[in-house]
Amino acid sequence: MTNDLETLITALYVKIDDELGGPRWLGRPPLLTDSELVCAAVAQAMLGFTSEAHWLRYARKHLAGMFPYLPQQSGYNKRLRAALGLVKRVIRMLAKSSDFWLDDCWIVDSTPVPCGMSRPTVKRSDLAGWAGYGYCASHSRFFWGLRLYLVCTPAGMPILWALADPKIGEREVLAAMLEVEAAVVSAHDGILLISDQGFAGRDFEQLLADQGITLLRPSRKREKARYGEPMLKKVRQLIESVNDTLKGQLDLEGHGGRCCAGVAVRVAQRILAMTAAIWLNNLTGAPITRSLIAYDH
């Protein structure tokens, strides 16, 4: 099988329709079904359209065979924001359908999701109270927005993810994620969690140990070298490359969201696109499971 965007959208549509089936709507069904909406969102992210108006014009002209009906921009936007729960369910469904879900080695990191570039934007934004100021060490700059926390396998398959105020501590956010998804954690035995120094803390490591999780991280300054530290550099590059896929190929930083629901669904949309590509590449035996090259044109 030759992987391309049409193959991905077709396989994803069939998977959603078979696994999740049944509309979320009462009464007269919409012309654009939930399965088609999710597939359209994935295609939009894969093709790099950050503007919904530009995306809909392109899709009507070039993708009419896959999407016979697409609503106007305002209708598409409302449907997409209302489908956040559905998008999250599809991400989890695809992850569980792959071999990577059984992997007990997880990698965690956080990356900035800027939501505004000027003081007037910050003052009038609907995100005030959720977003905040934070510091991006990799670019040596401050930003206003959120942080995306991603727990994934070495192959890049997302296991857990969350958006949080940058001012909240990394350990606090991860602890809350593991508490909310306690069923996922308990379903895995002997989890090895690889992180950077930002997640260091004696009490936090004890909390993880109580849940059957072993934390592997670099040692801090004036701290004795930790077990397994020499192998960390290569493994840590994996999560950095996953973040680079989200930012470089899927335009995470150019999400365009202006409200809480808008930002959340646009971030979820990009995570779903990456998850769908990994799922299909694994299913078809592609040599590189996180490659998006076959789907971005």
Image: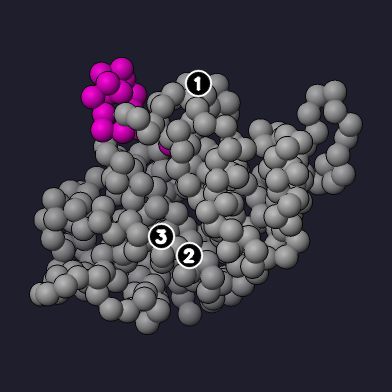
Q: CA distance from mark 3 to mark 2?
A: 6 Å
Whether residue 154 is in magenta: the answer is no
Residue type for callout 3: Lys
Residue 141's tag is 1
Classify mark 2: helix, strand or loop.
helix
Q: Is residue 84 above or below residue 230?
A: below
The image quarter in which residue 254 lies:
top left
Task: Please state the horizontal and vertical placement of residue 3, each as a whole percent of the image.
Answer: 45, 72
Q: Is residue 128 visible?
A: yes
Task: Please state the horizontal and vertical placement of residue 21, each as a whole percent of the image.
Answer: 32, 79
Classify mark 1: helix, strand or loop.
strand
Per the rendered image, the range of residues in magenta is 113-127
Task: Please state the horizontal and vertical placement of residue 30, each as a whole percent of the image.
Answer: 14, 70
Q: Is residue 98 left or right of residue 273?
A: right
Marked residue nearer the N-terminal end (1 or 3): 3
For disc 3, the marked residue is 88
Q: Is residue 92 left or right of residue 285?
A: left
For disc 2, the marked residue is 92
Where, quadrant-wise, is the C terminus in this rendering?
Answer: bottom left
Residue type for callout 1: Arg
**Nearer to the camera, 229 or 7:** 229
Marked residue nearer the N-terminal end (1 or 2): 2
